[in-house]
Image (cartoon, grey):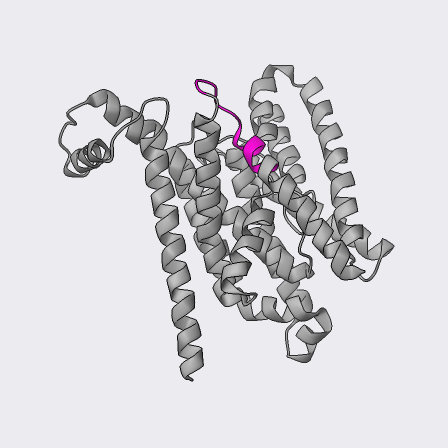
Amino acid sequence: MEEKQKHEGYGLWIWICLAGLTLAAMVTAVCVGSVSISIVECLQVFKAALTGTEAADPGTASILLSVRLPRVLCVALSGASLSVCGTAMQGLLKNPLADGSTLGISSGASLGAALAIAFGFQLPQLPFSGSMILAALFAFGSLILILSLSYMLDSSFSTNTIILLGIVYSMFMSSILSLVVTFALDKLKQITFWTMGSLAGSSYQNALVLFVMLAVCGTILIHLAEELNAFAIGEENAMNVGVDVKRVRLVILITISLLIGACVSIGGTIGFVGLVTPHIIRLMTGPNHKRLLPASMFGGAAFLTLADLAARTIVPPLELPIGVVTSFVGAILFVYVYYKVGRTAR
């Protein structure tokens, strides 16, 4: 009992540290940019906004409240969403390389969003409704297709088979996306936004959509933490302990697809977040999904916030797409994890 309490206390401290890191990253991202603003000035602007008084410097207030704050909120929420999706997929598939980008889900979602943009599909009075709906549908369809093909080729669901099919599927989706761009040159700029990944120009509406999706889908995934622990040991073990494997797998896949679809519809393709952060967080919390899933949300939010900050400040006055930064870091870790998995298999 004493050992258990000690372990729980350790896990609580990890969550507190990760939450503090996320908050520090968000505060830094709000203050730092092409125009640096001190924390004191930020607090004055926020105080004026909350009390309804006029800010001392309207220009600074406009930068903070209209540009940086909604962007930072969307970045943090997207990072948390992508990270928890990657964590859930790795546990469900018992695959350390599973992620929306490596399995082709993000590519499928991007194609869905691009088709919505190219053909003007949307629902009235709902922000980003068309791109979000098609992105979620294409994300779910992509995941089902890849897993079905993997099972047909290799019923053991080996890492090599799934990852190889994911890469091939991503290339196939990219070719179709290029075809869509060819026939929708007037929407080229907008579609390019989805393919490169960027949260510039994000609004409070976008942040609200991401918050609601993360609150609903994240709660579902955390509620299924015990089932994910059983899946991580093996599907047969999950059945032996009474898990309804087919139902739980379908619920998790739908939840992941909806969350990735929402992120892609707002920020475009941001790769490797769901691959990088779960492995880092797992070293601190261990494999128990009850601790791992909430912690991965904080880790993903902090990671993507720092990546976005780097994208905005690393080569001023230019701004890199956030997907470039995450893919650079993620690709290095991808090779490392793949190498470790290959050595373990041998």
Question: Residue 331 placed where, x, y %?
Answer: 65, 40
Magenta region: which residues? Answer: 316-327
Question: Residue 316 placed where, x, y %?
Answer: 44, 20
The quadrant holding residue 63 is top left
Can see residue 128? yes
Foreground of the two, 275 or 153: 275
- Reply above or below: 160 against 261: below
Specify the quadrant that holds the C terminus: bottom right
277 drawn magenta: no
Q: Name the residue at the right extreme.
A: 153
Question: Residue 240 placed where, x, y %?
Answer: 69, 79
- Reply above or below: 251 against 262: below
- Reply above or below: 313 against 182: below
Query: Which residue is drawn at the image coordinates 46% and 32% (left, top)?
Result: 310
Query: Which residue is drawn at the image coordinates 56% and 26% (left, top)?
Result: 193
Q: Left or right: 38 with respect to 307? A: left
